[in-house]
Amino acid sequence: MTQGNGDFMIAEKLVLQRQRHLKWRALDRLELALMIICGLLCFGFSLSVTADIVTRVIGRPWLWLQEVTSTLFIYAIFIGTAVATRRNDHLYLTAISESLHGVQRIAVELIIRLVVLGVAFCLIWYGYVNFLRGFGSFRLPSGTPIASLYAIIPISGVLIALFTIEQVVNGLRNGFDHPEPPEDDGTVPMVEGGQHTVVQP
């Protein structure tokens, strides 16, 4: 086995190990479904904005398009926040935690996730309160209760809490400090005449 192939296999093994530690396979399908929903919402948002502009330019505006646009935008934000939480792309301070190791790393990781859980529970509680109050206000021109906008807030909070608990359980079981794959040093492995050589760029 050449050195280049060996390094590649080690890097691939480390990446798979990191993914296995950080995620429950049972939630992978949920994450995928949420990503698809986010894509559809963003596409619908772009389409509705374009249609709104075109109909206004031609002098025949569809007033209900503004309601559709705001709904798609808000739903995309809160679902995207939940997905980003699972992927550690949002509400997560990596610069602090990744510079620590051992007990300090565990303590900081747990504190960060407790803060995220606090945010999630606020979204659940106050989002549900606003959802109930939203039945007393209506959107124009459709007359739809504004609760239709607020419904996604507690749902997003539940998803964020679920994904954060997943990270806490996996972190306590397997540790938060996982080795990263080695960075590419810019060398290009070449095989000539059965011998392995490394070419520097």
Image: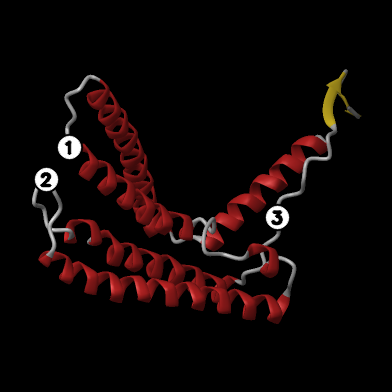
Residue at numbered disc 1: 63
Q: Quadrant of residue 178?
A: bottom right
> Which one is in front, 110 or 8?
110
Circle 2 packing at 10 Å, graded few (<14), some (14-19), many (20+), is few
Going 29% across and 36% down the picture, which residue do you hit?
44
Q: Secondary structure at mark 1?
A: loop
Q: Label 2, label 3: how many angstroms apart (C-alpha)? A: 53 Å
Residue 131, percent from left and from top: 20, 67
Going 24% across and 61% down the picture, which residue do you hit?
150
Circle 1 packing at 10 Å, graded few (<14), some (14-19), many (20+), is some
Which residue is farthest front?
A: 59
Q: Mark 2 or 3, which is nearer the eye?
A: 2
Q: Secondary structure at mark 3?
A: loop
Going 35% across and 54% down the picture, which residue do you hit?
79
Amino acid residing under circle 3: Glu
What's the mark number on residue 141?
2
Q: Mark 1 or 3, which is nearer the eye?
A: 1
Going 40% across and 65% down the picture, which residue do you hit?
160
Looking at the image, residue 44 lies above or below residue 154: above
Amino acid residing under circle 1: Leu
N-terminal label among 2 and 3:
2
Mark 1 and mark 2 in contact (Cβ < 8 Å)? yes
Q: Quadrant of residue 194?
A: top right
Residue 149, percent from left and from top: 23, 56
Residue 151, percent from left and from top: 22, 61
Amino acid residing under circle 2: Pro
Residue at numbered disc 3: 180
Whether residue 1 is visible here, answered yes or no, is no
Which residue is farthest left?
A: 143
